């Protein structure tokens, strides 16, 4: 968490300065994104909520996504991450939403992605999607790398690009 807190603090400062809020949907990061944002005192100023969307049941129950919403889209892909971020933003009425999905390791996922593969998406006034390949199979290291990359991407979007 020590490496994530400075990134989360920067996000918090930017959101507070704009009086904006954020929602988070994460999978392979396992809650580290949300935990780092909530570790900043006063998080209720900007953090609406977050969910670890780790299963089909969670995806349907928490985001209301059905099979028809995923037609032609597979998990751990850029279109999937964008869909998660967009749906979460809509459901919570957030100014910004951040989504992550991937394969933390030590093995790849059932879609053929290697461990260390993650897709990240931001939905908001600026929208971006990014794929990350760490090239590592260490689960904890990848989870931290995914969270750091997600917070960095969000910071870039908050900065206008």
Image (cartoon, rainbow, N blue to C red):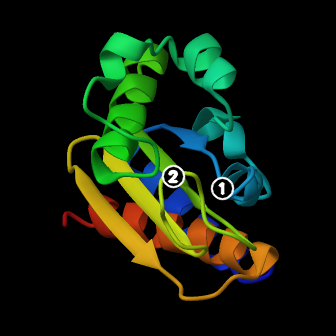
SS for dot 2: strand
How many numbered circles are shown?
2
**Residue 48 image point, x, y percent:** 60, 30
Residue 25 visible in image: yes
Of the residues under marks 1 and 2, which one precedes in the sequence? Answer: 1
Please name whichever residue, 119 or 89, is drawn nearer the observer in this view of the structure: 119
Distance between the Cα atoms at labels 1 and 2?
7 Å
Few, some or many C-alpha atoms within 10 Å of disc 1 (few <14, some 14-19, many ≥20)? many
Task: Write down the quadrant of residue 60 in the picture.
Answer: top right
Q: Residue at x 43, y 40 (%)?
A: 97
Q: Residue at x 77, y 73 (%)?
A: 139
Few, some or many C-alpha atoms within 10 Å of disc 2 (few <14, some 14-19, many ≥20)? many
Left/right of residue 128 with respect to residue 75 in the rendered view: left
Residue 7 visible in image: no
Please name whichever residue, 98 or 95, is drawn nearer the observer in this view of the structure: 98
Q: Residue at x 42, y 59 (%)?
A: 119
Q: From the image, which quarter does the C terminus lie in?
A: bottom left
Give the labeled residue for mark 2: 100
Q: Residue at x 45, y 16 (%)?
A: 65
- Toward the bottom, the furthest residue is 135
Instruction: Kindly check if marks 1 and 2 are in contact, taking CB atoms under 8 A apart as contact.
Output: yes
Q: Looking at the picture, does residue 150 appear above or below residue 28? A: below
Left/right of residue 90 with respect to residue 58 in the rendered view: left
Q: From the image, which quarter does the N terminus lie in?
A: bottom right
Q: Looking at the picture, does residue 150 appear above or below residue 91? A: below
Give the labeled residue for mark 1: 28
Q: Which mark is residue 57?
A: none
Q: Looking at the picture, does residue 106 appear above or below residue 35? A: below
SS for dot 1: loop
**Residue 108 image point, x, y percent:** 61, 66
Task: Write down the quadrant of residue 104 in the picture.
Answer: bottom right
């Amino acid at each position: 968490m020590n490496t994530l807190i400075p990134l989360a603090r920067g996000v918090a400062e930017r959101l507070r300065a704009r009086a904006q809020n954020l929602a988070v949907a994460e999978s392979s990061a396992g809650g580290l994104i949300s935990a780092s944002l909530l570790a900043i005192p006063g998080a209720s100023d900007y953090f609406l909520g977050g969910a670890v969307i780790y299963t089909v049941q969670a995806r349907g129950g928490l985001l209301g996504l059905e099979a028809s919403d995923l037609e032609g889209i597979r998990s751990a892909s850029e279109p999937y991450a964008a869909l998660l971020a967009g749906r979460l933003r809509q459901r919570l009425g957030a100014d910004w939403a951040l989504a992550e999905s991937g394969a933390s390791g030590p093995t790849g996922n059932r879609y053929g992605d290697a461990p260390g593969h993650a897709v990240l998406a931001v939905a908001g006034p600026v929208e971006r999607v990014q794929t990350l390949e760490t090239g590592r199979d260490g689960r904890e290291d990848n989870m931290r790398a995914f969270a750091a990359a997600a917070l960095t991407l969000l910071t870039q979007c908050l900065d206008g690009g």
